[in-house]
Amino acid sequence: MRSRDDIGLEIIRILKACEGGYASGQALSLELGVSRTAVWKHIKLLKKAGFLIEAIPSKGYRLDSSSLPFNDIEVSSSLSTEFIGRKIFFYQSLDSTNIRAYELGRGGCAEGTAVIADSQTNGKGRVGRRWESLPGVNLYTSIVLKPPVPPQSANNLTFLSAVALAESVSHFIRRRPSVKWPNDVLVDGRKIAGILLEMDSEADRVHFVVVGIGVNLNMKEEMFPESLRNTATSVMEKAGEAVDRAEFARSLYSSMGKWYKIYLKEGFAPVLDEWRGYFEAEGRPVKVISFNRTVAGICAGVDRDGALLVRTPSGKVERVVSGDVETAR
Amino acid sequence: MRSRDDIGLEIIRILKACEGGYASGQALSLELGVSRTAVWKHIKLLKKAGFLIEAIPSKGYRLDSSSLPFNDIEVSSSLSTEFIGRKIFFYQSLDSTNIRAYELGRGGCAEGTAVIADSQTNGKGRVGRRWESLPGVNLYTSIVLKPPVPPQSANNLTFLSAVALAESVSHFIRRRPSVKWPNDVLVDGRKIAGILLEMDSEADRVHFVVVGIGVNLNMKEEMFPESLRNTATSVMEKAGEAVDRAEFARSLYSSMGKWYKIYLKEGFAPVLDEWRGYFEAEGRPVKVISFNRTVAGICAGVDRDGALLVRTPSGKVERVVSGDVETAR
């Protein structure tokens, strides 16, 4: 049984396939197996959802692609992934996409289910921090994955998501960003995106992981809170032009889908190798604060589990599994 | 502000303190700071909850302790722990105590909050297995803990719970049980209790852990399903008499509280040492099935993280972090 949204989605797919041409009401009605009146009703709903659809009695319907809304139908209608984002829950405002995705995960949602919010009232950063989440400009999304791994390995997906994020950002700004251990993406040393991984597991296995991602897309410098102005940037600032949020979301889901497939087939090594290509702190002085312990020294890279290696002045290499890193620049 | 249950709990505490003697309505009214009519109403509720309370106009109220109900008030009224089980959610029937405790954890409940169900309709065993959960005979409880550790260490609490369980079981059967790696307690090679640990975490830290515990208390051999009859036993079978379920729950909470305090202060080592004292498989042939891999050899104990060590015929010692163990007997 198709839901109302499924038919709307199919209409948008058909209109997009017409590439600015007209699709007659009769053609749509035949294609979708619903009455012409039903088609007309769905078109009305789509217009309400922000799609600019022109209707001319003799010709049919035409989609104006110059201005598309940001919602689940728009993200889904051009998506090429196998399962990431095949089901999207879209909200104008949400406390936190991670909280909602977690609920969906607990409820047994399909793997790849994604949540998007235009804005968050209580966006979550790492270790209980807030993530500023303005409406209308950025991407806040959380994806439910169910990797068949023990909880010790769940963190692999932080690296995987960082790789996917770096790949998508580089596609839009036409430069390679860098990754900051363990879960940020930077451009010119400023944060452009962050990842918050949460999981539901038992001792032996992960039930599901929620990958929460926040990307600064169309933030202008002056929109950042004072405290972040010197440490944050956005894709728009670096690309020199506004970014279509739905297009970015699709690019991200597609990149995540690609790397997730590699991960399931070949394990963590190829993902981590790719991540290392974006990691620039190796050989530089670093200071890590981890569980009330500070480790300072020269970064010696990451080991095969993704733990940070720090060569301290004594020559010993310390292994850090979590914490906050400061890099001398 | 005290809830209705709090006043009921205080009345039971006072009546218990009278050790079979009478507490007058006036004394209770003064002690609790409520009217005598209120006292009478609470007594009525307590009777409904299964407490046998005798009321004699000239003397007052008296609790018949020879038959106490199994519920949250009864468990709480004689509890000596600091925070484990200070708040108990009791249900006659529940899908799964772990599911309910997880919800409470997500909702931000206090550490130590416990759930007890007289029976479970969908009791959870490890890796998606069912846990048979008959009404009226056993203990099914889940406890929410918030250890300040990374998710890699959460499994420590499985060992801690096994130690607490073994301690409580030995108190009732007056013999030392053994532990089966990673999360069962056995007597004479038969399972008497099991643990299912689930957690909510991010990559760096655990938000909370749910320790789910099922103990076969008053099961007679013929009550076990056919498939378990040769591999399971109960405290009653081994003690030779029925066990008071509330008393067992209190003993378990108290032992968990003791070990949890040691764990927070001194780390995992003393907990694991204690666990090793109950572990009898060392030096014996074992076969472990873990993530579709079978490791067979002689058990060489557990390492400091609790991983099972198996010396294979080639002489190599394999480290197994999760799985099912078969011991040759």
Image (cartoon, coloured by chain):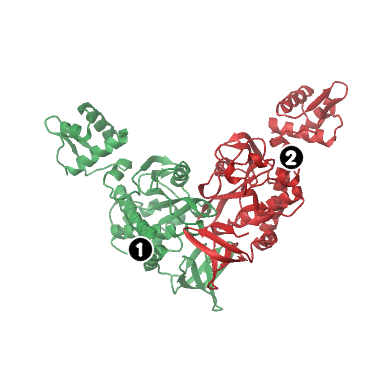
Chain colours: A red, B green
Residue A219 percent across, percent down from the top left:
67, 41
* Image mark 2: chain: A
**Which residue occupies the foreground of this view, B187 or A113?**
A113
**Which residue occupies the foreground of this view, A232 or A252?**
A232
Instruction: Quadrant for the C terminus of chain B, please.
Output: bottom left
Residue B274 vertical position relative to residue A189 in the rendered view, above or below:
below
**Which residue occupies the foreground of this view, A114 or B183?**
A114
- Check disc 2 and report its element: helix, strand or loop: loop
Left or right of residue B84, residue B198 in this image:
right
- Whether residue B37 is visible here, answered yes or no, is yes
Left or right of residue A280, residue B24 in this image:
left
Distance between the alpha carbons at the discs numbered 2 and 1: 64 Å
Residue B184 vertical position relative to residue A143 in the rendered view, above or below:
below
Residue B99 percent across, percent down from the top left:
47, 44
Residue A243 percent across, percent down from the top left:
74, 41
* Image mark 1: chain: B
| Residue topped by disc 2 | A244
**In the orientation shown, which residue stands out farthest toward the left?**
B58
